[in-house]
């Protein structure tokens, strides 16, 4: 029924302000009413019925509006807010897509020019070079196409002096050459393997093909103003963790508003097997006519008659060809960035096995070029989400902690004498290098007082470091094992000692009084946008000690940084770096970083599954869990190599130097042994049928299988295997592929496993090689061990027993449930006990 005019006039409260439709009633709000409602909306966007009624009572100007109409106002207000946010987000995405489209069009134009140039030069050389000359020309160093570019990339500069005019001439030439690489065709760029450009990717990343030295190029978008981008990129030590220092020795302003800087830069070496690199550079910052900012750099050489920097001890002088950054604004307050890195890292100065690190443009792109883009994107995210915190800390503070961990590890690994490091004598073996640092600056922050009255009196820091070559081991998988299974390689006493040395003091070597850790708890702190780096706190629980040792920490905390755990990334360096901290660590907490760095030396892409994390049972081709090779010959057609560098730091009192050095050597050697054992199990070279036959095709394996089956039949009265074949090989094959886990252990005071079928290896998460390192008691929990102790006499007396279902543990401490278990004594041909065999029925991981 139509509403009367009288009712309609009653519905219209007043004129002006906002309106709300409610069942045909149109309500107009005055500015005062809207202001009151907005105040409540900002405090409580979704008020309850009681809160709305309270608002009406507190605001007389709303007294003539029904609560239901106020409810509708808030609904509409929330809807408008949501629409505004969505519209803003879509506008931001549209601006980003427009900028990316512009970038892709420019890249397409550049590629078309590059193709045209290559076609032209190819045609030119074919027409002007005799066929016999083409046949005899030595092309071992450069292609025919790139030989025409060689002199363009490294021109013979006319002699110049160190005057401002001479330096400006070098700077202008550097700028032109850099731009020709960033947006032109001076270098033949090819897309880096594994990088997929797109709106959500880090950007377009390319590496050089056929040019002098190594070169990488990246272009992308970042939500920062160009001036801010340039400021960040010029501060290289803040984002490039291999950069030890950049000293600005002189600054010259130019007439066009730019600046010329003379720089000396030092880079850390990535391993103990190579010296660091340093550069003597000219950096030119200028503004283009279109408002773009350009930072171009190059090395200064003696041929230019410019100022020189003498050689520095422990560093090899490397050369930077024209490189830099081009930063252009785009609508919405962001920037389009082009980055070029082009260097000669003097590969001759490192052992031949390491030269791929210094001759690979892919390594340069991953380590340097994309690191700059990632850092910028991380800062842009922090700016757009300034309130994002984690465990009470802002992202910038967490990133600073991660940066300190990485730089501290590099410092320990390089051990430069100007930072106070000195080498001490070895024990006749040169596998572990021991350095000591008594520099007060190094110890600053470690010697602090605590509430318990103790003051740390450590006056020295020791570093034990070593490098080893790994064959055919995926770095990402090995690193993940080291991260998630610390108990497999770490020593509890050492962890507790390191924590006590920094936090408590006085520092004394710990003995047997320190018990075992109950386990580790990983507490995530932060991760970067692409998740290529994780920052976390590791809590090592349950350090047992007597009351008189109350000064020692009951739980040990480690700040840990992990990177390079993506198995699909090509040639990525994997790092696990950690340092003991206090449970309530401050942003400026003292850190003594230790850890591992695994650098692949071959750019062979791993084809392993992401789920093949820590499944050591996958070291045999027939494994049911984890990774399986695509063919009988393994994962890849050739072996891959990587170099692992280990460095551990310890704070100590100077009079204990010999004891701590001996402990550190022994500890690092034990870690090397553990890593080698794990690497052997993880190596795809041990996959395949040939590896299976080498373990199982022996006469001993056939004999043991026969004894297992005969003993089972004797005690149980039934056959263990339903085997159609009569030969020993078919019986062995049937036992190996049996669905239940069958494993044998020795008859000793501390039984250890000697054999297991495939299901047994899968259940224990180990390999035949590593099986003998596992003792029987390790796989049972407390309840299972009690049952085993009570049933063991039955096994020895009557020859067999049956165990109730329960829970046991794999070698990775993963719980495994089983429906029931049968154990029987395995007799040899002389009717004497050879071993005890266990069969776990219907087992599965919990």
Image (cartoon, grey):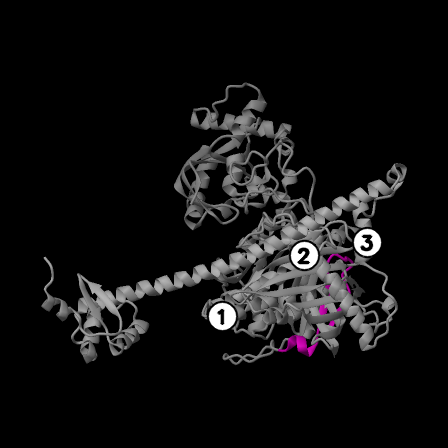
Disc assigned to residue 217? 2
Residue for badge 1: 394
Position of 365 with respect to 2 (left or right) is right
- Between disc 1 and disc 2, whose residue precedes? 2
Question: In the image, residue 86 lies at what x, y percent?
Answer: 40, 60
Q: CA distance from mark 1 to mark 2?
A: 31 Å
Q: CA distance from mark 3 to mark 1?
A: 48 Å
- In what element is the residue under mark 2? strand
Q: Is residue 826 left or right of residue 136?
A: left
**Closer-to-camera residue (252/776):** 252
| Crowd class of label 1 (few under 14; some 14 to 19; many from 20; radius 10 Å) | some
> Which image quarter is the C terminus in?
top left
Q: Nearer the viewer, residue 391 or 5?
A: 5
| Residue nearest the observer in this picture, 87 or 243 | 87
**Are circles 3 and 2 on residues that touch, CB within 8 Å?**
no
Query: In this rendering, does residue 572 appear at all?
Result: no
- Indicate yes or no whether the magenta region holds residue 504: no
SS label for mark 3: helix
Counting from the top left corner in percent of width and height, residue 51 is at 22, 72
Which region shows up in magenta?
420-444
Which comes sooner in the sequence, label 3 or label 1? 3
Per the image, the residue denoted by label 3 is: 150
Q: How many marks?
A: 3
Which quarter of the image is occupied by the N terminus? Answer: bottom left
| Residue at point 74%, 56% (across, down) | 431
């Amino acid at each position: 029924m139509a509403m009367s005019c009288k009712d309609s006039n009653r519905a219209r409260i007043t004129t002006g302000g906002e309106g709300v439709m409610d069942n045909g009633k149109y309500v107009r709000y005055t500015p005062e009413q809207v202001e009151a409602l907005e105040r409540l909306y900002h405090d409580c966007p979704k008020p309850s019925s009681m809160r709305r009624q309270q608002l009406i009572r507190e605001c007389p100007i709303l007294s003539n509006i029904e609560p239901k109409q106020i409810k509708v106002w808030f609904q509409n207000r929330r809807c408008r807010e949501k629409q505004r946010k969505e519209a803003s987000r879509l506008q931001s995405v549209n601006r980003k897509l427009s900028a990316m489209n512009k970038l892709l069009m420019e890249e397409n134009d550049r590629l078309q020019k590059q193709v045209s140039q290559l076609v032209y030069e190819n045609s030119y050389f074919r027409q002007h070079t005799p066929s016999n000359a083409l046949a005899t020309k030595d092309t071992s160093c450069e292609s025919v196409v790139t030989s025409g570019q060689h002199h363009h990339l490294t021109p013979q500069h006319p002699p110049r002096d160190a005057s401002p005019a001479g330096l400006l001439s070098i700077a202008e030439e550097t700028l032109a050459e850099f731009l020709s690489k960033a947006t032109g065709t001076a270098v033949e760029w090819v897309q880096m393997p594994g990088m997929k450009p797109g709106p959500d990717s880090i950007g377009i990343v390319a590496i050089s093909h056929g040019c002098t030295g190594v070169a990488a190029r990246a272009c992308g978008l970042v939500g920062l103003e160009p001036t801010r981008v340039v400021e960040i990129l010029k501060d290289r030590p803040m984002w490039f963790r291999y950069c030890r220092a950049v000293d600005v020795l002189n600054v010259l302003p130019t007439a066009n508003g730019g600046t010329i800087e003379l720089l000396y830069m030092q880079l850390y070496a990535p391993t103990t097997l190579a010296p660091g690199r340093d550069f003597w550079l000219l950096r030119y910052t200028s503004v283009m006519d279109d408002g773009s900012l350009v930072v171009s750099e190059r090395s200064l050489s003696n041929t230019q008659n410019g100022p020189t920097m003498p050689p520095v001890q422990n560093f090899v002088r490397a050369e930077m060809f024209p490189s830099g950054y081009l930063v252009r604004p785009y609508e919405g307050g962001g920037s389009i960035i082009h980055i070029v890195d082009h260097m000669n890292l003097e590969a001759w100065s490192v052992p031949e096995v390491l030269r791929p690190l210094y001759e690979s443009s892919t390594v340069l792109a991953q380590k340097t070029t994309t690191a700059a883009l990632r850092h910028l994107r991380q800062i842009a995210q922090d700016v757009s989400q300034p309130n994002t915190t984690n465990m009470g800390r802002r992202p910038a503070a967490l990133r600073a902690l991660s940066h300190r961990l990485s730089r501290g590890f590099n410092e320990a690994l390089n051990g430069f004498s100007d930072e106070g490091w000195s080498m001490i004598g070895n024990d006749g073996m040169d596998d572990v290098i021991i350095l000591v640092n008594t520099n007060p600056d190094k110890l600053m922050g470690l010697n602090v007082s605590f509430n318990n009255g103790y003051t740390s009196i450590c006056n020295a820091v020791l570093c034990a470091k070593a490098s080893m070559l790994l064959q055919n081991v995926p770095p990402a998988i090995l690193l993940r094992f080291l991260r998630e299974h610390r108990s497999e390689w770490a020593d509890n006493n050492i962890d507790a000692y390191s924590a006590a040395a920094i936090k408590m003091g006085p520092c004394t070597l710990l003995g047997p009084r320190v018990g075992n850790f109950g386990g580790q708890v990983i507490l995530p702190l932060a991760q970067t946008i692409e998740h290529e780096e994780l920052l976390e706190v590791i809590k090592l629980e349950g350090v047992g000690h007597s009351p008189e040792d109350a000064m020692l920490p009951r739980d040990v905390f480690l700040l840990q940084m992990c990177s390079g755990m993506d198995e699909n990334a090509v040639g990525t360096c994997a790092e696990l770096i950690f340092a003991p901290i206090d449970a309530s660590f401050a942003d400026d907490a003292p850190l003594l970083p230790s850890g591992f760095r695994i650098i692949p030396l071959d750019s062979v892409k791993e084809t392993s599954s992401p789920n093949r994390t820590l499944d050591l049972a996958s070291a045999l081709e027939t494994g049911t869990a984890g990774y399986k090779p695509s063919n009988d010959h393994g994962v890849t057609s050739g072996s891959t190599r990587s170099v692992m560098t280990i460095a551990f730091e310890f704070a100590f009192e100077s009079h204990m130097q010999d004891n701590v050095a001996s402990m550190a050597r022994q500890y690092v050697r034990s870690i090397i042994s553990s890593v080698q054992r794990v690497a052997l199990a993880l190596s795809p070279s041990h996959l395949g049928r040939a590896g299976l036959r080498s373990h199982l095709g022996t006469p001993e394996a056939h004999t043991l299988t026969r004894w297992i089956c005969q003993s089972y039949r004797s005690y149980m009265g039934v056959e263990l295997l339903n085997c159609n074949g009569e030969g020993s090989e078919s019986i062995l094959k049937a036992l190996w592929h049996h669905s239940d886990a069958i494993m044998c252990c020795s008859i000793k005071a501390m039984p250890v496993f000697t054999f297991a079928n495939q299901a047994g290896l899968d259940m224990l998460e180990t390999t035949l090689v590593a099986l003998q390192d596992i003792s029987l008691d390790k796989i049972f929990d407390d309840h299972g061990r009690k049952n085993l102790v009570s049933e063991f006499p039955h096994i020895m007396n009557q020859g067999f027993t049956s165990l109730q279902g329960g829970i046991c543990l794999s070698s990775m401490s993963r719980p495994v449930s089983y429906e029931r278990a049968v154990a029987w004594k395995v007799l040899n041909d002389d009717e004497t006990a050879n071993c005890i065999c266990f069969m776990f029925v219907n087992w599965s991981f919990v």
